[in-house]
Every structure is written in structure tokens, then in C-alpha cells.
Image (spheres, rainbow, N blue to C red):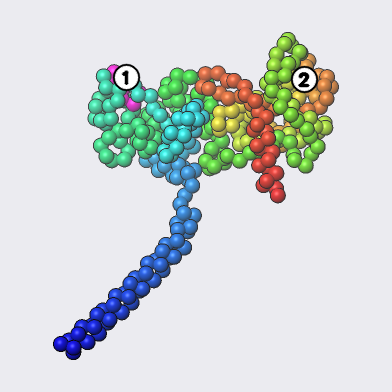
Amino acid sequence: MSLIRIRNSKSARLTSYLLLIAGTTTALLLASSQQTASAELPQKQAAKPDIYTERKSIYEEIGELTQIPWFRLAAIDQYERSLTPKAKLEARKSRLIHLEPKAFLWAGRINPDTTDTNPVSIGIFGGIGKDASGDGIADPANDRDAIYSMARYLQSYGPSEDDFSIAVWRYYQNDRAVERIRQFTKIYKTYNTLNLQDTSFPLPLTSVYSYRDTWGDRRGYGGNRIHEGTDLFASYGVPVRSTCYGIVETKGWNRFGGWRIGIRDLQNRYHYYAHLLGYDKTIEIGGTVKPGQVVGWVGSSGYGGPGTQGKFPPHLHYGIYRDTGHNEWAFDPYPLLRQWEQAERSRHK
């Protein structure tokens, strides 16, 4: 009996040692695996394409299928994005495409079911909805279905710029939409990227200038009115720079603003620069500009007929207006100016 107990005792100790070794080995393997995974994780995250690259790849993919240039699809999608309220944009942030086709156009004007997602019945009723993902459903909330359907709609009108303008007008029934989308198209085509979010302060940070929030101050010239902008005081000849990527929409004399220039950006905002001394020779209506590009110089023009100067100290009047799709309204640019100034200072540190 004692011999059996000794053997059993040795066997138990041996089993315990083996289990301990096995457990230690497993723990070491798991630790090593976790370290390897954690070491690889940043590389995988860094390799993930940004939202602009992913979005552009969809435009290019659909463009190859339909022969519609990617920048036309991008322009329509961005126009819709620029009109979408912030709360709705936030709710749809998981989507790459923000195009939201009108229900009656998607399903067909005479389709009794405005929520129809069957490609066959949609086609019977003349709707634009298509299935691009191969799941048998024409879903306007599906990124590829939405942008592919728009591309096929544009394709049906023809490839020229005039064909494109006609298709856009018939879709939106709005001249303003046609103009904005053509402007966005030119910006994207010029810079060949979607990542055009950079900004600049309108005056060089190395210059001597001062400004405060003058939004809503009373103005007397031309009748009682409020000041729709911010005045940035600086010496004659200080360069005035574009704050954004955009397209020159207006240029010339205005009896209030003197020599002024207006630039439209991709957020559908109109940037208004007034009281200029003159323009850079490269600036023309319809031309594109980028952040930091000189468009003119600080002056004191305005408050009279063409050429009137010196009725007030030299300064840049900077205003900004948002297009709602049917009209424009001004908003206080001071917070944006402060933001752009601080961001540029941080970049130069």
C-alpha cells in the first residue's frame, strides 16, 4: 500500500509540473501574440485610406463604368453635402456618399410606390434608381447605388459640358445649382484631389494688422444698413490672400466695396474681399485659387464712383455668405478668422 501511495504521489507531482509548464508556455505564447498584434495595429491603421481617398475611389470606379468623369460626380455629391444641415450630416457620417436622390425621381414620377427599390419596376416607371452592388435592390441609401444611378442619369444626356449642364438643370430645376456644380467641377478637375480643406488667414501673419468683431455695426453711406463682415486694418499695399480653395466668381467695382473680389469655396460659401487697392494680374473671373494665394492688396477704395479712394483708413473688409440653394445670407466671419489665424500660427511654429 505504501509503495502505491509513493507512486501515486510522484505521478501527481509530475502531472502538476507538466500542467504548470503547459500553462506558463500558453501564457507566454498569448503575451507574445498580443505584443505582435499590438505592434502590427498601428501599421494597419496607418495603411487604412482616408475618407477622401475612399470617396474618390468610388467616383473613379463608377466613372470607369459609365464614362462620366469622377470630378463631375464629386461636384454633384459635394453640392448636396453643402446644402445638408450639420445635424443630418452628423447622422450620416458613416456614409461616404451624401447624394440623396429625390424619391419621385428615384422610383419614377408615375410610380405609385415612391419607396420602390425593385430595379425592374423602377425601370418600368422611368425612375433613375439602379442596382450597382449586385444585391437585386436599388437602394438610394447605398453609396454605390446612389452615385451609379446619378452617373447613368448623366450618361443618358451625353458627354459634353453642355449635356452635363442640361442634365443638372433638369434634375434640380435650378440655375443656381447648375452654376455651383460647374464651379465645383472645375475646382476638383484643377487640383485632382478631394482633400481641399486647407485654409489661410486673409493677411500675411508677418504684416502689421488689427481687427475686432465689427459684425452688425451701423453704416451710413448709401442709407442705414448693418456691417456684414469684419474690417482688418492694415497699411496700403499689404497683400490680401485667398482663405480657401475656390473659384473667382466676381471681380470689379462696387460703389460700396470699391475694387472687390468674390470667391466661391467648396462649402458653397462666398468670400467677399472689399476696398482693395488693386488685383493680382493672374486673377480672372472663372479662375481657381488656393489658400494663401495673393489676390490683391489692401486699399481704401469705395463709397463712390469707379476709382474713388481715401474716404476711410485703408483696410480689408472681409465678408462671408452661405448659399442655401435658393438665396444667400451673410454670417459673422470673425470666429472663422480667429480660427484660421490660430491654425496658421500653429503650422508655422
Image position of 110 with respect to 74: above or below: above
Q: Which mark is residue 340?
A: none
Decide if residue 93 is on the left or right side of residue 276.
left
Q: Residue at (69%, 38%) from the top-left corner?
A: 341
Give residue 30's position: percent from left, percent from top: 37, 67
Give 31 or 280, whichever is nearer the viewer: 31
Give residue 269's position: percent from left, percent from top: 59, 28
Residue denoted by label 2: 302
Give residue 224's position: percent from left, percent from top: 72, 11
Residue 1 in sight:
yes
Label whose residue precedes the other's in the sequence (1 or 2): 1
Q: Quadrant of the N terminus?
A: bottom left
* Amino acid type at image mark 2: Gly
Residue denoted by label 1: 109
Give 178 or 327, whichever is nearer the viewer: 327
Neighbour tally class for label 1: few under 14, some 14-19, many 20 plus, Cα within 10 Å: some
Decide if residue 120 is on the left or right side of residue 274.
left
Neighbour tally class for label 2: few under 14, some 14-19, many 20 plus, Cα within 10 Å: many
Give residue 181's position: percent from left, percent from top: 51, 29
Q: Which residues are magenta?
A: 105-111
Residue 284 in sight:
no
